[in-house]
């Protein structure tokens, strides 16, 4: 039997609170420890990964019981990682917004796939006990995306320098942060798993649709390593818009030739996962195409294609969350180097 314990709960990197849980018998040697070291960078609160708002086992608990050491991060200036006064402004999402975009999307139907949402536990609306418990866990966040990405890249790299190689799992707003951490620590990131990463490249779609460039470096708001280097993204990254491949998908803004590569990301096994009913179902294929165009051999796991149906954006809290976790661990075992050896 695997015994579980809290390893520690502490600020080990400035402005970054890290909750670390592990199995007592995990990591009998350095390679085994690295293979099962796993940390989450998401756009919500670290505790959301422990258990679900209706009391079921969450992903962190599931992976811990399978022998992984799990690092749960409260992003700098989010939750228990303190905001520094004068450093940007804080924001939060209303209960109505979260219900409409994340938990009861089948009612709002703001995109074609929303009608397929069936996996949220409860109604997903205010007054439902499960929804109210979930909304109570939502916290303020830094509202300046460039600041978010800069401080999280710095903190994530510092954490890897302390704990050593790991697989990084990101969700939503954490997606670009994962790209940026991997970019500056490619030898320490053994695998990168992007759950519906913030996107699509360059321009917003669905929630806000605009031709304005909001991610000037394609995947990120701040600089990331390209080859040849990008000094001024507005002139160095030439863009082309490809039409959608079906009526329920968005168009895709990609690079026009000659295409610059992402050499540091190309060194790392990478998985992008998308659900059936999320707004990401409209455009995550664009993020995958952009990565592949830039030389990244990314695997794209579109959940309905493997028989997992009805999920929206908070897949790790929904009724079939452990079925999805099993798919992730299967990928880790196939792709992360220490677990293949």
Image (spheres, grey):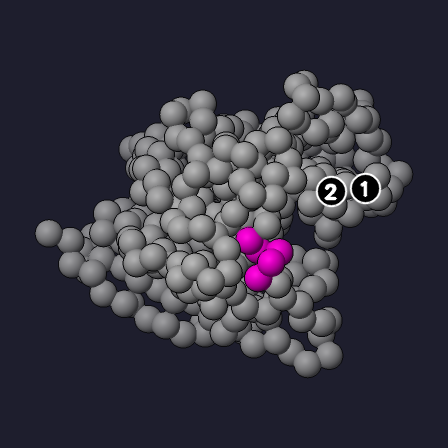
Residue at label 1? 210
For image coordinates 47% across by 52% down, the residue present is 124
The answer to the question of whether label 2 and label 1 lie on touching residues, with beta carbons closer than 8 A, is yes
Residue 39: x %, y % from top left: 42, 54
SS at mark 1? loop
For image coordinates 35% across by 50% down, the residue present is 59
For image coordinates 15% across by 53% down, the residue present is 2
Q: How many marks?
A: 2
Q: Earlier in the sequence, mark 2 or mark 1?
A: 2
- Magenta residues, start to end: 95-99
Q: Quadrant of the C terminus?
A: top left
**Quick check: can you spot residue 194?**
no
Residue at label 2? 204
Residue 258: x %, y % from top left: 79, 24
> In the image, is 320 to the left or to the right of 177?
left
In this picture, is 182 found above or below 200?
A: below
State yes or no: residue 108 in magenta.
Answer: no
Residue 169: x %, y % from top left: 46, 47
């Amino acid at each position: 039997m695997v015994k579980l314990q809290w390893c520690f709960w502490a600020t080990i990197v400035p402005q970054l609170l890290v909750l670390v849980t592990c199995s007592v018998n995990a990591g009998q040697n350095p390679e085994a420890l690295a293979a099962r070291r796993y940390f989450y960078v998401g756009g919500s609160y670290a505790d959301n990964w422990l258990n679900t708002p209706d009391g079921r086992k969450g992903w962190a608990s599931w992976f811990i019981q399978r022998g992984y050491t799990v690092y749960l991060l409260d992003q700098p200036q989010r939750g228990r990682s303190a905001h520094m006064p004068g450093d940007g402004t804080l924001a939060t999402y209303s209960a109505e917004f979260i219900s409409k975009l994340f938990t009861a999307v089948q009612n709002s139907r703001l995109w074609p796939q929303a009608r397929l949402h069936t996996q949220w536990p409860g109604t997903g609306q205010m007054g439902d006990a499960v929804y109210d418990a979930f909304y109570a866990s939502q916290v303020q966040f830094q509202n300046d995306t460039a600041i978010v990405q800069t401080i999280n890249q710095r903190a994530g790299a510092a954490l890897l320098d302390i704990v050593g190689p790991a697989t990084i799992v990101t969700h939503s707003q954490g997606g670009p942060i994962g790209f940026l951490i991997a970019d500056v620590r490619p030898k320490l990131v053994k695998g990168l798993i992007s759950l519906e990463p913030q996107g699509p490249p360059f321009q917003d779609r669905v929630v806000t649709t605009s031709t304005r460039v909001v991610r000037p470096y394609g995947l990120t708001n701040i600089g990331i390593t390209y080859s040849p280097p990008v000094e001024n993204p507005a002139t160095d990254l030439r863009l082309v818009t490809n039409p959608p491949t079906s009526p329920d998908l968005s168009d895709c803004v990609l690079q026009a030739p000659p295409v610059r590569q992402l050499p540091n990301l190309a060194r790392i096994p990478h998985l992008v996962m998308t659900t059936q009913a999320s707004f990401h179902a409209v455009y995550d294929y664009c993020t995958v195409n952009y990565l592949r165009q830039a030389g990244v051999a990314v695997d794209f796991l579109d959940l309905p294609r493997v028989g997992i149906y009805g999920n929206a954006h908070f897949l790790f809290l929904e009724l079939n969350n452990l079925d999805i976790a099993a798919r992730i661990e299967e990928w880790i075992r196939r792709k992360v180097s220490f677990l293949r050896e």
